[in-house]
Image: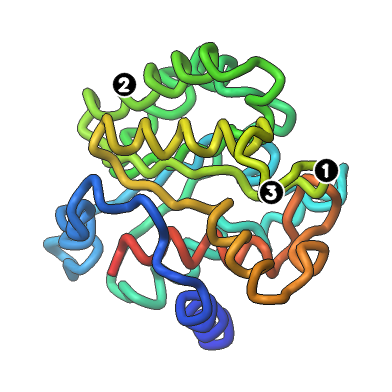
Amino acid sequence: MRQIVLVLLMALWVCPATPNVSSPPDNYLQDVISELSRQWPQNRTVNIVCHGHSVPAGYFRTPMVDTFNAYPHLLHRGLKAQFPYAVANVIVTAIGGENSEAGAKRFDRDVLVLRPDVVTIDYCLNDRSIGLPRAEAAWKAMIAQAKNAGARVILLTPTPDTSARLDDPNDPLNRHAEQIRRLARENDVAIVDSLALFRARVRAGEPLESFMSQSNHPNRKGHEIVAAGLIRWFH
């Protein structure tokens, strides 16, 4: 446990502040943090649901699913280190190969039924196949449903794909990432700008391949970047 926490703290130290997180206040999750800080018998179970495609599902080199090195599990370990009295569940509802339209169709059945306190949404990699307008409609639907249910929302821009042109603003991956940044601002919800965090590490001289288990799936080192971005919101 201590080793995992140190790794995530190092990731927080070497990563620049997550861009585009100024729409909601820094204490956006204050109510959740308060619940996580309570001790028995005043505490209750806090549910955090990670929704999306193969990356939050834990796929590394397909078909290998490395659950305990993927960012939902790293988030869970980090939260338990920070909130030792909390009864916290980090629940994965992600499906490999799925896009946001399919995720939106099952959002009520698979996500809201869990009565989440926080929902993370991560679909950009696969949304390139359906295009920006359809993806925007699906993301808006999920954001609205989560907010109406009283859940806090954290959107994630995509982790990298080595086939993408990361420095080309017209590359589909960058265009979908920019759409998610805009949706976070317009809907006053939190964001972890994963793509910007990876790009910063690459510009600092670290090869992109050092964060990847295959062309479109991060390895443990890559998942640590995302987990650190998420944990930042719980400070």
Color theme of the render: rainbow
Name which residue type carries label 3.
Leu
Front-lying residue, 37 or 231: 231
Q: Position of residue 36 (x, y in %)?
A: 25, 62
Q: Is residue 93 visible?
A: no
199 over 169 or under it: above or below: below
Name which of mark 3 and mark 2 comes first in the sequence. 2
> In 3D space, how far apart are the residues under numbered discs 2 and 1 (Cα atoms)?
33 Å
Residue named by callout 2: 145
Mark 1 neighbour density, 10 Å: few (under 14) some (14–19) many (20 or more): few
- Please report the residue visible at 18 percent of the width from the left and 53 percent of the height from the top: 25
Classify residue 169 as left or right of residue 17: right
40 over 184 or under it: above or below: below
Name which residue type carries label 2.
Gln
**SS assignment at label 1:** loop
Q: Is residue 231 visible?
A: yes
Q: Position of residue 22 (x, y in %)?
A: 26, 52
Q: Position of residue 225 (x, y in %)?
A: 57, 65
- Please report the residue visible at 74 percent of the width from the left and 64 percent of the height from the top: 211
Residue 131 sits in quarter: top right
> In 3D space, how far apart are the residues under numbered discs 3 and 2 (Cα atoms)?
32 Å
Q: Which label was assigned to residue 166?
A: 3
**SS assignment at label 3:** loop
Residue named by callout 1: 163
Kindly indicate whether the residue at mark 1 contacts the one at mark 3 (C-beta within 8 angstroms): no
